[in-house]
Image (cartoon, grey):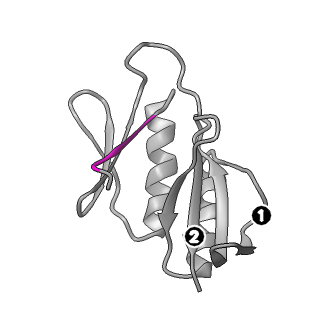
Amino acid sequence: MFSHIVIGANDIDAAKAFYDATFGVLGLPEGTIDSRGRIRYVDGNDVLVITRPLDGRAATGANGGTIGFHAADAAEVSAWHEAGLAHGGTTCENPPGLRHTPMGDMYLAYLRDPSGNKLCVKFVP
């Protein structure tokens, strides 16, 4: 359904350190910075681009928005959360753990990146 997702960052170096660390835990390669100073993370057909806002204003997290990623197991979810905290992220929602949801049981962790974007990693047992 998606071709790509673009999110804003106020500090590209801080964003790259955060995403390289958290995506590294998920087995993804480091991002590359293109000629426009944008970070690109590519996994097959999935593309995440991180950039300074084109309008020159400060980047802010989407109110009500969350970007979710898959993990291989619960340990990987927890390791992703720890890597994010160590690289400028802040925890949000509840601590990593098992949630009983209407869609079934899921092991989830939530973080805000250094620019405030809300992220989630999930493992479905």
Residue 123 versus residue 25 in the image, above or below:
below
Q: Quadrant of the C terminus?
A: bottom right
Does the stretch in magenta take in 4?
yes
Residue at image x 52%, y 58%?
68
57 vs 48, left or right, is right
Circle 2: residue type: Lys
Residue 93 versus residue 40 in the image, above or below:
below
Horizontal and vertical percent position of residue 59:
53, 25
Residue located beneath label 1 in the image: 95
78 vs 21, left or right, is right
Does the stretch in magenta take in 41?
no
Residue range in magenta is 3-7
Residue 91 versus residue 103 in the image, above or below:
above
Residue 26 versus residue 112 in the image, above or below:
below
| Mark 1 or 2, nearer chain start | 1
Residue located beneath label 2 in the image: 122
Residue at image x 58%, y 28%?
60
Describe the element under mark 2 as helix, strand or loop: strand
5 vs 75, left or right, is left
Circle 1: residue type: Pro
Q: Quadrant of residue 109?
A: bottom right
Most extreme residue toward the left, as rendered?
Answer: 35
